[in-house]
């Protein structure tokens, strides 16, 4: 079966899907709005929603039992957050020296199979990677994206922020780590990466993918270098970039920013039709090179 791409969907359907994924329209409203476009292609609105939803097995690049890595689920203390946070820790099997560490922050669905796969990919580039699950406090990622989004809305974000702060501090002190911590996040996680940059001045590198910008008043607290990725067709997120960029310049923050033309929000996520292979490959190449430069 030929894999669908964004070219198979009307732009208005893609906009509706983005709003649906981020809780700004209900499933019912998506189906109603997408219905007239579905009819044009001989599909159904429900069929469009299914086609746009993640296909985790199809996109998996690194199997969980890959012999080159060691994986585990661990719990760490988060006294200022939810008490504990559980996450996925992945490292190369062979450690010839202390390695840089990378905190991986998921989208607004928790620690799903795609983010676990991303974490394994980072480990294979010779980092120790840790991906916490913000949904741990409500039972963890439920195995269903719609349920995960619903659970996400119930989180106390102030405590969740502290969970990710605790996770970064855990990596800084990790015995096999070199003391340097990078952060990469996607969508919600991109916004969290921007936030953590304002909270943790000792971060070594921060890479937000199409994430909400940090509060401009807090930008002056950023010390870590930033590598920022934006999708070209992402009005919702990109609307905040001019003010964020102005604040970064005013505070003389070391940053690089790239906008990938004709791509959709989520272009790095290879489980959905919004994935853009060329842009994702370039953004990922830049990300790993940035971590290698800043964390080793």
Image (cartoon, rainbow, N blue to C red):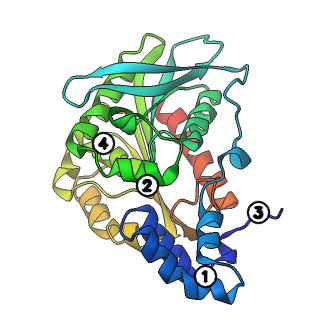
Compute the Cα span from label 1 to label 3. Answer: 16 Å
The image quarter containing residue 156 is top left
Q: CA distance from mark 4 to mark 1?
A: 36 Å
- Residue 227 image offset from top left, x and y in percent: 45, 49
Label ID, residue 187: 2
Spatial CA distance of label 2 from label 3 is: 23 Å
Foreground tag (1 vs 2): 1
Label 3–label 4 contact, CB within 8 A: no
Would residue 253 be visible to someone looking at this image?
A: yes
Reading the image, the residue beneath label 3 is: 3
Residue 197 badge = 4
Q: Residue 256: give x, y in percent of width and height.
A: 44, 54
Where residue 276 appears, as percent x and y from the top left, is 65, 62
In terms of secondary structure, where does tag 3 sit?
loop
Q: Earlier in the sequence, mark 1 or mark 3?
A: 3
Q: Who is closer to the viewer here, 44 or 283?
A: 44
Q: Residues within 10 Å of mark 2 (few under 14, many from 20)?
A: many
Q: Earlier in the sequence, mark 2 or mark 3?
A: 3
Q: Quadrant of residue 6?
A: bottom right
Q: Which mark is first along the chain, 1 or 4? A: 1
Q: Is residue 55 above or below residue 183?
A: below
Identified at 56% across, 36% down, the residue is 116
Q: Nearer the viewer, mark 3 or mark 4?
A: 3
Q: Which-is-in-front pick, marks 4 and 1?
A: 1
Q: Residue furthest right?
A: 1
**Mark 3 closeness class: few <14, some 14–19, many ≥20 residues within 10 Å:** few
Q: Mark 1 = which residue?
A: 10
Nearer-N-terminus badge (4/2): 2
Compared to residue 222, the image places residue 30 above or below, namely below
Q: SS for tag 1?
A: loop
């Amino acid at each position: 079966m030929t894999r669908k791409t964004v070219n198979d969907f009307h732009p208005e359907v893609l906009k509706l899907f983005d709003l649906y994924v981020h809780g700004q329209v209900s499933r019912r409203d998506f189906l109603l709005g997408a219905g007239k476009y579905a009819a044009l292609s001989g599909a159904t609105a429900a069929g469009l929603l299914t086609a746009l939803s993640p296909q985790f097995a199809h996109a998996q690049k690194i199997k969980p039992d890959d012999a080159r890595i060691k994986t585990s689920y661990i719990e760490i203390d988060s006294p200022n957050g939810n008490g504990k946070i559980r996450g996925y820790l992945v490292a190369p099997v062979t450690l010839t020296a202390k390695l840089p560490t990378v905190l991986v922050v998921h989208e607004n669905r928790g620690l799903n199979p795609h983010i676990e796969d991303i974490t394994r990919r980072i480990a294979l580039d010779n980092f120790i990677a840790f991906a916490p699950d913000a949904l741990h406090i409500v039972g963890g990622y439920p195995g269903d994206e719609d349920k995960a989004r619903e659970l996400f809305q119930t989180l106390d974000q102030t405590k969740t922020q502290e969970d990710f702060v605790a996770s970064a501090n855990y990596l800084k002190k990790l015995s096999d780590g070199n003391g340097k911590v990078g952060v990469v996040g996607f969508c919600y996680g991109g916004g969290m990466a921007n936030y953590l940059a304002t909270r943790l001045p000792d971060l070594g590198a921060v890479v937000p993918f199409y994430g909400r910008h940090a509060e401009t008043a807090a930008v002056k607290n950023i010390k870590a270098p930033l590598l920022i990725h934006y999708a070209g067709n992402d009005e919702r997120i990109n609307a905040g970039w001019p003010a964020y960029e102005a604040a970064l310049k005013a505070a003389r923050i070391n940053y690089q920013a790239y906008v990938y033309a004709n791509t959709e929000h989520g272009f790095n996520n290879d489980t959905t039709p919004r994935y853009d292979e060329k842009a994702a490959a370039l953004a990922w190449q830049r990300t790993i090179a940035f971590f290698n430069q800043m964390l080793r």
